Image: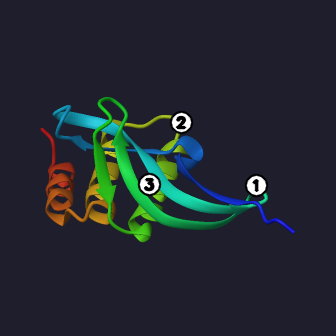
Amino acid sequence: MAIIWGTGGKSKNPGNLWVPYFCSSCDDLSGFNVVENYRYGQVYGIRVAKYRASYFLVCATCDRVLAIDTKEQFIQAQEIGRRIAARAETSPEFLMRRVAEVAKWVMGNSELARAIEADLNTPKD
């Protein structure tokens, strides 16, 4: 009896989620797609194993790729993206708070997150 098996790869953005972050190529705030790349094994055309998963933020404007180090950070990025998607209107303050969250929880840049939060909490004249 022959067993039909194979492998493949996939890149996906579940829910078309995006998060705001600063793009050094665009030199501006941009929307970044939350993307997972992985390889998979299959038997008889049915996927049975997922392996070598990697996670990224991809700039929607210039396609710059920022690597996400861990699956937990990827999950955080998805959660932030879901909060943005659930909101019909997004104010600049709402988006900047999400940028601070992405900086701190996804990219591990606590210094940038503190600077954004300090700016947002400073009274405006």
Instruction: Identify which amino acid the numbered label 3 is placed on.
Output: Ile
Looking at the image, which residue is at 24% across and 65% down?
Answer: 108
Tag of residue 80: 3
Q: In front here: 92 or 68? A: 68
Q: Earlier in the sequence, mark 3 or mark 1?
A: 1
Q: In front here: 112 or 18? A: 18
Q: Is residue 4 left or right of residue 76?
A: right
Q: How is the image coloured?
A: rainbow
Separation of marks 1 and 2 at Cα, in angstroms: 39 Å
SS class of the residue under badge 2? loop
Separation of marks 2 and 3 at Cα, in angstroms: 14 Å
Instruction: Identify which amino acid the numbered label 1 is placed on.
Output: Gly
Q: Nearer the viewer, mark 3 or mark 1?
A: 1
Q: Is residue 80 above or below residue 95?
A: below
SS class of the residue under badge 3? helix
Q: In front here: 73 or 43? A: 43
Instruction: Identify which amino acid the numbered label 2 is placed on.
Output: Ala
Looking at the image, which residue is at 87% across and 69% down?
Answer: 1
Q: Earlier in the sequence, mark 1 or mark 2?
A: 1
Residue 111 location, x and y as percent? 14, 62
Q: Nearer the viewer, mark 1 or mark 2?
A: 1
Looking at the image, which residue is at 50% across and 45% down?
Answer: 17
Q: Earlier in the sequence, mark 2 or mark 3?
A: 3
Residue 99 location, x and y as percent? 29, 49
Q: Quadrant of the C terminus?
A: top left
The answer to whether the residues at label 3 and label 1 have Cβ atoms under 8 Å apart is no
Which residue is label 1 attached to? 45
Residue closest to the far front:
1
Residue 115 location, x and y as percent? 14, 56
Tag of residue 88: 2
Looking at the image, which residue is at 37% across and 33% down?
Answer: 60
Label 1 neighbourhood size at 10 Å, few (<14), some (14-19), many (20+)? few
